[in-house]
Image (tube, rainbow, N blue to C red):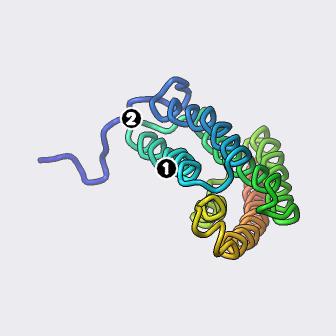
């Protein structure tokens, strides 16, 4: 008889592993993001700028695919959202510098990311972990496309409102997912604290 359908091959790497293909891809994404940011500031909307940003963003799918096949790690769980924040916030800050984005929507996104990162760090020290939702993944996707539309030459010059509209959609998703995360984290913490009291 064959193995049960639910059985899968053991992961290549354990949760404490540091040097894994997925983590190396994530670190490369962090290292490459400043290149994209400098290109925005120096050159603005060009196809070369868009291509570099698109390539960096696509590595997010590559490291996720590698992590699912070879084993997810604690280092990866920390580095992956950090890489997204470096790319998104750095790219948006560069677009504010170039006056393609206004300060308010970018500041709202940055504030949410800082607050949630600080809260997640504090909750993690208490043993409270809340997995990312599908809506949070869409939030990052929309944030990246707001940047992409802003550096895509035809849209940047003739239809910049598309980038602006996408940015405000990203703001709405960012604030919604932030509130949802805080509410879910509180519920998880309450359940865990109740369980500890009853043990």
Residue plotted at (31% across, 52% down)? 6
Residue at far left of view? 1
Q: Residues within 10 Å of mark 1 (few under 14, many from 20)?
A: few
* Image quadrant where residue 66 sits: top left
The residue mark sitting in front, 1 or 2, is: 1
N-term-proximal mark, 1 vs 2: 2
Helix, strand or loop at mark 2 = loop
x and y, in percent, of residue 127 in the image: 73, 42
Tell me the distance, in whole angstroms, between the alpha carbons under discs 1 and 2.
23 Å
x and y, in percent, of residue 33 in the image: 64, 40
* Image quadrant where residue 154 sits: bottom right
x and y, in percent, of residue 74 in the image: 60, 35
Picture disc at residue 58: 1
Picture disc at residue 71: none
Helix, strand or loop at mark 1 = helix
Residue plotted at (82% across, 65% down)? 105
Number of disc labels: 2
Picture disc at residue 11: 2
């Amino acid at each position: 008889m064959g193995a049960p359908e639910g059985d899968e091959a053991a992961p290549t790497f354990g949760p404490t592993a540091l040097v894994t293909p997925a983590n190396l891809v994530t670190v490369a994404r962090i290292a490459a993001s400043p290149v994209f940011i400098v290109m925005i500031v120096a050159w603005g909307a060009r196809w070369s700028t868009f291509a570099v940003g698109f390539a960096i963003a696509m590595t997010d799918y590559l490291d996720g695919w590698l992590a699912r096949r070879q084993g997810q790690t604690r280092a990866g769980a920390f580095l992956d959202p950090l890489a997204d924040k470096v790319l998104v916030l750095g790219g948006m800050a560069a677009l504010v510098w170039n006056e393609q984005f206004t300060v308010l929507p970018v500041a709202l996104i940055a504030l949410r990311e800082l607050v949630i990162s600080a809260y997640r760090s504090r909750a993690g020290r208490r043993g409270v972990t809340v997995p990312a939702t599908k809506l949070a993944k869409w939030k990052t996707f929309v944030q990246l496309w707001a940047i992409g539309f802003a550096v895509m030459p035809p849209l940047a010059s003739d239809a910049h409102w598309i980038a602006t509209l996408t940015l405000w959609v990203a703001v709405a998703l960012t604030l919604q997912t932030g509130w949802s995360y805080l509410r879910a984290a509180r519920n998880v913490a309450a359940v865990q604290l109740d369980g500890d009291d009853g043990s």
